[in-house]
Image (spheres, rainbow, N blue to C red):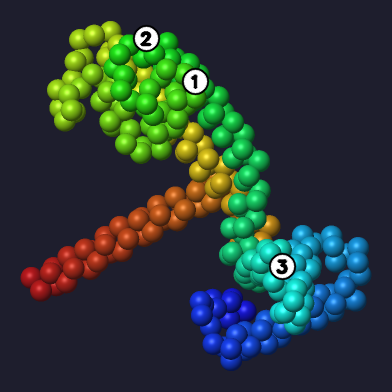
Amino acid sequence: SNMAVMAMEHYNESPSFELAMKILNFVFLSIFVVEMVIKLLALGFAAYFRDHWNKLDFFIIVVSIPDLVGQVVPALDNFGFMTVFRVFRVARMFKLINKAKGLRTLFNTLISSVPAIFNVASLLLLLMFVYAVLGMNVFGSTDRFDGQPHVNFNNIGTSMITLFRVFTCDGWSSVVAIAFNCDDQGFQCNMTSATSVVAGLYFPSFMLLTTFVMLNLVIAVIIDNFIESAQSEGLLKTNNFVDLLKMVVTLKVFVRLLRLKLESLKNREAARRRARLV
């Protein structure tokens, strides 16, 4: 309900509508404060702040109080920093994550995957740096990228930007076409020169290592953390992803064998009926 009320705000609101939004904001904030106080009395300060979700609730309430004060005292609402506190109200949607197991599992997966994804991103950056240096030595001494101020291998910065464009597949075909010394339409390319031959090894290997290997490694990290989060939430009973895969494969094989057995029994029954009729 709180998120629906926040989504109803719009430009050029009428005074009555704005007053209704302020009242509803006060009601929801009061509910959150009462909830926090009840938890503090029941759990105590130490146990309450031991839970990260309770810390998030406390942060949401603290940053919502200045916005409420600014609505009650119009003079304070004119200060610019009050707008910052008003923006923090969007953090209330994270309270929905704590109530749903599925959303909480995905959120925990995202948080727990950040360190591993950072390591993969560091390895990807190192790989791009190596290829950028190789590109400077291979294509920096040629005139194929002349007249291309944003796509060339003249220095390490532009080389990294060019490889990032290839990595994200954002117009990467035009970069490869320039490297192969193709015409304006990209149909006829000069593949006889040594630079073109090296480009034929340079760009496919880069795409293979970055797009297919690194990105799939990120997906593998996310899946592994998702399995752990699902186990902690009680949504998955297996120990690891391999066990889950074995269960799925075994179930598919069992269903297939059962289907073949039923078809065999049907064929035998049909053969017996035909024999009786004869």
- In x, y percent, where is residue 104? 63, 62
Determine whether, in the image, residue 83 is placed left or right of residue 136: right
- Quarter residue 25 falls in: bottom right
Give the residue at mark 1.
156
- In x, y percent, where is residue 70? 74, 76
Vertical side of 174 occupied by 224: above or below? below
Determine whether, in the image, residue 37 is placed left or right of residue 213: right
Q: Which mark is residue 141?
A: 2
Three-letter residue code for mark 3: Phe
Secondary element type, mark 1: helix
Vertical side of 258 occupied by 32: above or below? below
Crowding at dot 2, Cα within 10 Å, few <14 / some 14-19 / many 20+, comes out as: few
Q: Nearer the viewer, residue 182 or 86?
A: 86
Crowding at dot 1, Cα within 10 Å, few <14 / some 14-19 / many 20+, comes out as: some
Secondary element type, mark 3: loop
Give the residue at mark 3.
79
**First of labels 1, 2 by sequence position:** 2
Three-letter residue code for mark 2: Ser
Secondary element type, mark 2: loop
Three-letter residue code for mark 1: Ile
Q: Which mark is residue 128?
A: none
- In x, y percent, where is residue 102? 58, 65
